[in-house]
Image (cartoon, grey):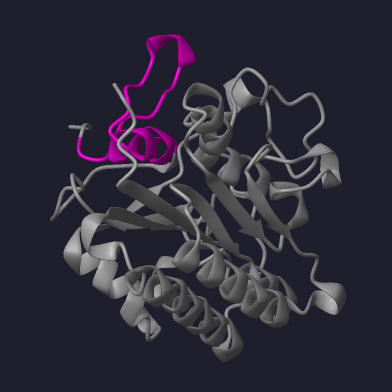
Amino acid sequence: MAFAPHRRIVVFGVDGVRTDTLAAAHTPRIDAIATDGFHATFELNDLAPTVSGPGWSNVATGVWADKHNIDGNIFADHRLADYPDFLTRLRTAWPEIRTYAAADWPPLVGPDCEGPVFATPHRVLRLEAHGHDYDSTGADIALDAARTLGGGDYHAAFVYFGEPDEVAHHEGVTPNYLAAVERADARIGQVLDAIRGRVSFAEEEWTFIVVTDHGHIDTGGHGGRDPWEARAWIAASGPGIPSGPVVTEHADIAPTVFAALGLDIEAEWGLEGVPFGARG
């Protein structure tokens, strides 16, 4: 199917947000996306270790760790060349599509830990939080993403905020953790406001997805199968996004990106996810 340039999509990744903390936090921008489309919670399946490397790789590629071969936070022997991230697949199959990625966990967009997961965006912002200052890097990501997506000609983007996960690792599920979730929501709002302020916004069709990779145990940390660390969530809205209850999981995000842009999914890609709403 031919690419329709008025269709656009942003996937926001917010690392390590428990479902109960999200419910308790003041997150009007994520809530609005959910109200316009859906919010789904789900248990990570047995092919989805509860750590960030495989979690974000599942989101990015549309396949599970047995295919992309990332089962931890060191990406040695990965198979991302065979199962590339959705931005790379878009750029390869449809050269006219322009892509953007920004993250403050460096392996997502840089060579750290034998990354990156997102390999070839047209524009990339790679930040490293010195002294664990993910509040500062989150602010920088929001500013750059707002400027880039609000003023540039980009069709697909991945914008990541790592602060909630970092806070939980250092002090557990505390009021500071909840505050980090709220800051991430405000930064998502900053990017959304910039997009909605585009001169061409009325003629465009935007899809927005917000996703977390895993939760945390009460004292902080993840990697096991405790329900609080093995539960994740997705919120999404936009043309073609179903409303109400939706059964979904991480591998469905990449296929949804292609569907939202009006593009055909090729069987030879071997994707294991399906577009939102296609599961029983």
Residue lying furthest top: 268
Q: Quadrant of residue 203?
A: bottom left
Q: How far across and how far down the image is residue 27, in percent? A: 37, 80
Q: Is residue 6 magenta?
A: no
Q: Quadrant of residue 103?
A: bottom right
Q: Quadrant of the C terminus?
A: top left
Residue lying furthest left: 244
Q: How far across and how far down the image is residue 170, in percent? A: 74, 76
In this view, 78 is above or below 220: above
- Tell me how many marks there are: 0
Q: How far across and how far down the image is residue 276, in percent? A: 26, 40
Which residue is at a point 38% across and 29% down the rendered structure image? 273
Q: How far across and how far down the image is residue 113, in percent? A: 84, 43
In this view, 176 is above or below 37: below
Asked whether residue 15 appears in the rendered view, the answer is no
In this view, 201 is above or below 111: below
**Viewer-nearest residue: 279 or 268:** 268
Which residue is at a point 14% across and 54% down the rendered structure image? 243
Asked whether residue 48 appears in the rendered view, the answer is yes
Residue lying furthest front: 199
Q: Taking 140 as reference, is 17 left or right? A: left
**Viewer-nearest residue: 87 or 183:** 87
Q: Quadrant of the N terminus?
A: top left
Which residue is at a point 68% across and 32% down the rendered structure image? 70
Give the magenta range.
251-277
Q: Is residue 271 magenta?
A: yes
Q: Taking 72 as reference, is 240 left or right? A: left
Q: Taking 228 as reference, is 69 left or right? A: right
